[in-house]
Image (cartoon, rainbow, N blue to C red):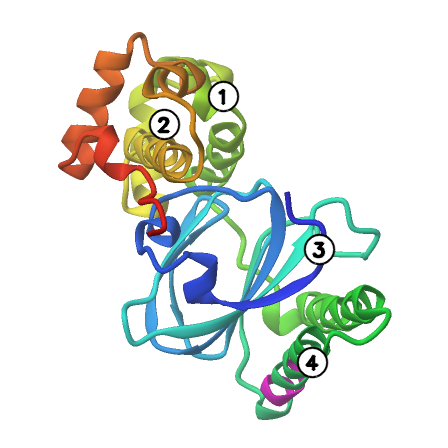
Amino acid sequence: MQEDVAIITLSQLGKGEDWRLSLAHDRPYNVLIWVTRGQGRLMLDGQRSGVGAHNAVYVPAGALFSLELGRQGFGQVVVIPQDTELRLPQIPRQLRIRDVHLQTELSALIEAAQREQSQGRPLKRDALEAHAGLMSVWLRRLIAEEEHLPPPRNAAARLSSRFAKHLAEGYASGAPMADYARAMAVTPTHLTRAIKAATGKTAADLLTERVLYEARDMLAGSSHSAKDIARHLGFGSAAYFTRFIQQHVGKPPSQLRAKPIA
């Protein structure tokens, strides 16, 4: 669990592994991503969009997202604990910052926090929270501006946003797609059509990605057995879980374990 504000790179957020960013997932802490180089695709709040340099992406704890930026992409990430007392936006947002002064302002705030983080001075934790508070002010000011108000969403986009919330909360239940559709009072066909229109992927694709992310994360970062992970993620058996991993990764679960340090 993240306890302190931290400044890291996008590569560090993904631990150097593309799947940790490209698969749909959510995190137990808030992140502000400041993209400074490259372009790619973002899935946030059930919507797909392009992303590029000078984009600020705010992802609250528990919000489903994915980011594909490519090898040439670079960004900085402000990680903020979920239980912080800082005032933060309540909903995911992507802001395209065209004003050079605003770009410089956020970069300067992040650089100041980086210096504080690296110096290890007394009261570093308090100082980092103060810097994060200023970044939150920067973010909330822009969100309130008319230029950055999101366009009205159609019914499919609103349904996709609702599905993203349901998925982040219930992906480990093992529930079939029909249960998600029933919970949102639509048919599975309508749900799939709406999600496809909003994200470019089907509802089943996103569910698969979220489960796959969690499975790979647990295999790489814990000592839980494949049987226990399968049970946690709602699989009927360890054998079914193994087939799932083999199908989507091309390797058995045993090969996805973190390699011991020599």
Q: CA distance from mark 1 to mark 2?
A: 9 Å
Rendered-image quadrant of the N terminus: top right
Left/right of residue 141 with respect to residue 248 in the rendered view: right
Which labelled disc corresponds to residue 184? 1
For the residues bearing labels 2 and 3, Cβ distance under 8 angstroms: no
Q: CA distance from mark 4 to mark 2?
A: 41 Å
Frontmost of labels 3 and 4 is 4
Q: CA distance from mark 4 to mark 1?
A: 41 Å
Left/right of residue 74 with respect to residue 78 in the rendered view: left
Task: Specify few, some or many for label 4: CA neighbours under 10 Å numbering under 14, 14-19, or 20 or more.
Answer: some
Residue that numbered label 2 is attached to: 191
Q: Earlier in the sequence, mark 2 or mark 3?
A: 3
> Which amino acid type is marked by label 1?
Met
Q: For the magenta stretch, what is the residue range?
A: 102-106
Q: CA distance from mark 2 to mark 3?
A: 28 Å
> Which amino acid type is marked by label 2?
Leu
Q: CA distance from mark 1 to mark 3?
A: 25 Å
Residue that numbered label 3 is attached to: 89
> Which amino acid type is marked by label 4?
Leu
Residue that numbered label 4 is attached to: 109
Percent across and percent down for residue 212 are 32, 34
